[in-house]
Amino acid sequence: MKKLMWVFISILILIIIGIIIVVCINAYVTGYSEPRIKTNYEDFPKVGAILVLGCEVKDDGSLSLMLRDRLNKGIEAYQNGISSKIIVSGDNRSESNTEVNVMKQYLLDNQVKEEDIIMDSAGYSTYDSMYRLKEIFHVDKCVIITQKYHLYRAIYIGSQLGIDSYGIASEGDQYDGQWVRDFREVLARNKDFVKCIFRPEASSMEQ
């Protein structure tokens, strides 16, 4: 019985230590990135590209609310002269998932010149998008557009991979199920914190 109690206590201690590590890494990533999230366009340096990170496209090919907010903020940054190039990065592995094509068309419909749009169809994850931004598209300084909860991680990854990264939060109305995204993001920050230590290649290195 005494041995069983020690096993239980040991497991509990390990769980507590694990929770502390997760919380500390999460706090570090958000604290690191917070000063690089800006709201005033005059505060931004000139950058090589505006990176708009992809997310859900509906089955009928229309934009989800989150993606529309990201693209609108990207257009705003483009119109304010932050960069003359917009890179849309997302997953285009199947015919039913055409994130970057839909994103490009939305930009074209909103007066962004076609020659100013670059498509990254192998942005299968936030880490992949940032890795490819540096190694495939050779961008050393960028402004990232996504919702704020996601922006902390994207900025941190970019900075660790050698990109001078800044961010604009594309917050709109309240998004359904945000508490689930917030929880998953805590775990994702920890995963990508470790990934940035070892810096593996992106899943795809094709142009």
Image: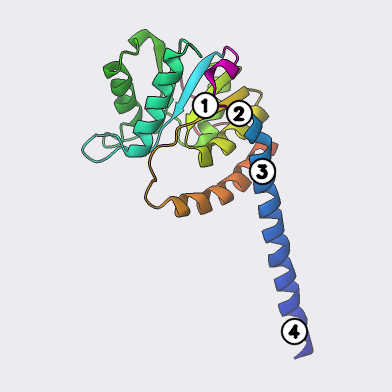
**Residue picked out by circle 4:** 5
Circle nearer the viewer, 2 or 1: 1
Disc 4 residue type (three-letter): Met
**Residue picked out by circle 2:** 158
- Asked if the residues shown at circle 2 and circle 1 are in contact, with their CB atoms under 8 angstroms apart, the answer is yes
Q: Earlier in the sequence, mark 4 or mark 1?
A: 4
Q: Earlier in the sequence, mark 2 or mark 3?
A: 2
Numbered disc 2: secondary structure: helix
Q: Is residue 70 above or below residue 140?
A: below
Q: CA distance from mark 3 to mark 4?
A: 33 Å
- Asked if the residues shown at circle 2 and circle 3 are in contact, with their CB atoms under 8 angstroms apart, the answer is no
Q: Is residue 153 toward the left or the right of residue 25 in the image?
A: left
Q: Earlier in the sequence, mark 2 or mark 1?
A: 1
Q: Earlier in the sequence, mark 1 or mark 3?
A: 1
Disc 1 residue type (three-letter): Ile
Q: CA distance from mark 2 to mark 1?
A: 9 Å
